[in-house]
């Protein structure tokens, strides 16, 4: 709409005063409008294909368009015609108002555009033979300051809204304690993989369920703060042991899940499960306490006897199954112990 308004002013000026200056201005406006529309179409196509877009060229074209608009206001002001004086200034001020409210996502670009337009408009007003230039020169600085304020405030409101939406989406799909994808996000990923078209489906993948059994003993003995530290450290270790492109999430409590891509052989899945068990079997060093771990030997895992002092806690041990990698915590000496079964 801003370009249509500018072209209407060009056409009016060229109709009233058919001169080379107005003709060149009109041709430049039409040519630049064509270039900008072409850049928009190219950006849309490349963005849909996840390809780089000529954003810098479009920004440069936007600044040139602002310069042409300001030049048009200057020509209208120095023409001596009251109709062009009024039409050119009203068009320029209206376009600046639209820029201030519409382009809130690019505040620096808006400030450059407003400064360019009002600078050329002010020069034209100073050279204008019309008596209305006094009012224009007096009001232009206040008008520009007002539009600057609108642009900055609109940008702050837009950024705050986008941050709130991003935070809301992240909390809805990620666990607030560990930062891992939650049950909803994991379910969404699995549905996308299984419901996709055959031609778009990824390769085979494996889902490993990870359960820290006996985790309640840590919470009861050291408190929930220590339990949270164990969960956060477990999440870091799981992220480190998985390959790039694999996904690890937290379902609930002490239950995690890992999605391994390109897992075409069961032996690869077993090796990954063993790595997960071993990485969770390392000691957890907490604030003023040490969580001792049981040993992991092949597929058979027997809890070791953990020695405990006043600052120590119980340690998880590992147990691996075909589709389940579990870390179990030894129970206090006053409670019955059980030896994990040998997995096939």
Image (cartoon, rainbow, N blue to C red):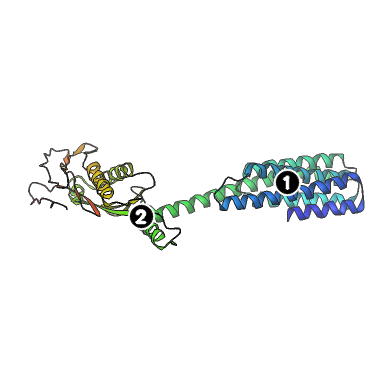
What secondary structure is marked by label 2?
Answer: loop
Mark 1 and mark 2: Cα distance apart in space: 62 Å
Between residue 252 and residue 282, name the one nearer to us: 282
Mark on residue 220?
Answer: none
Give x and y (percent) for residue 45: 61, 52
- Which residue in the protein does label 1 denote? 143
Drawn side of residue 198 relative to residue 319, left or right = right
Tell us which disc is closer to us: 1 or 2: 2
Give x and y (percent) for residue 252: 29, 55
Q: Where the N terminus falls, by quadrant?
A: bottom right
Q: Quadrant of residue 67?
A: top right
Is the residue under label 2 in contact with that under label 1 (CB below 8 Å)? no
Between residue 164 and residue 20, name the one nearer to us: 20
Drawn side of residue 8 relative to residue 193, left or right = right
Give x and y (percent) for residue 211: 23, 52
Give x and y (percent) for residue 195: 41, 63
Q: Quadrant of residue 130?
A: top right
Callout count:
2
**Classed neighbour count for the residue bearing mark 1: other residues with Cα under 10 Å, few (<14), some (14–19), many (≥20):** some
Residue 132 visible: no
Drawn side of residue 156 relative to residue 291, left or right = right
- Which residue in the protein does label 2 denote? 204
Between residue 150 and residue 303, name the one nearer to us: 303
Earlier residue among tags 1 and 2: 1
Q: Is residue 59 above or below residue 6?
A: above
Drawn side of residue 32 relative to residue 268, left or right = right
Residue 245 visible: yes
**Classed neighbour count for the residue bearing mark 2: other residues with Cα under 10 Å, few (<14), some (14–19), many (≥20):** few
What secondary structure is marked by label 1?
Answer: helix
């Amino acid at each position: 709409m801003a370009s249509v308004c500018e072209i209407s002013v060009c056409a009016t000026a060229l109709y009233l005063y058919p001169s080379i200056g107005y003709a060149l201005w009109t041709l430049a406006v039409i040519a630049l409008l064509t270039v900008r529309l072409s850049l928009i179409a190219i950006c849309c196509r490349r963005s849909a294909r996840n390809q780089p877009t000529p954003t810098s060229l479009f920004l440069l074209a936007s600044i040139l368009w602002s310069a042409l608009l300001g030049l048009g206001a200057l020509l209208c002001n120095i023409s001596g015609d009251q109709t062009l004086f009024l039409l050119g200034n009203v068009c320029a001020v209206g376009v600046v108002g639209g820029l201030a409210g519409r382009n809130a996502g690019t505040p620096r670009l808006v400030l450059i555009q407003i400064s360019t337009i009002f600078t050329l408009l002010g020069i034209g007003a100073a050279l204008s033979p019309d008596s209305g230039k006094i009012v224009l020169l007096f009001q232009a600085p206040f008008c520009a300051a007002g539009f600057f304020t609108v642009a900055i405030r609109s940008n702050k409101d837009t950024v705050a809204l986008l941050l709130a939406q991003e935070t809301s989406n992240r909390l809805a799909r990620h666990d607030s304690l560990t930062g891992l994808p939650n049950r909803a996000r994991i379910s969404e990923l699995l549905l996308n993989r299984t419901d996709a078209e055959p031609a778009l489906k990824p390769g085979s993948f494996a889902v490993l369920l990870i359960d820290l059994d006996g985790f309640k003993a840590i919470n009861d003995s050291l408190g929930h703060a220590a339990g949270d530290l164990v969960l956060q450290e477990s999440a870091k270790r799981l992220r480190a042991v998985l390959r790039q492109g694999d996904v690890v999430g937290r379902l609930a409590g002490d239950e995690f899940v890992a999605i391994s891509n390109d897992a075409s052989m069961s032996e690869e899945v077993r090796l990954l499960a063993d790595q997960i068990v071993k990485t969770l079997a390392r000691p957890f060093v907490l604030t003023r306490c040490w969580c001792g771990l049981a040993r992991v030997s092949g597929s058979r895992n027997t809890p070791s006897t953990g020695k405990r002092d006043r600052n120590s806690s119980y340690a998880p041990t590992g147990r691996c199954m075909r589709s389940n990698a579990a870390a179990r915590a030894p129970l206090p000496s006053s409670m019955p112990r059980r030896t994990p079964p040998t997995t096939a």
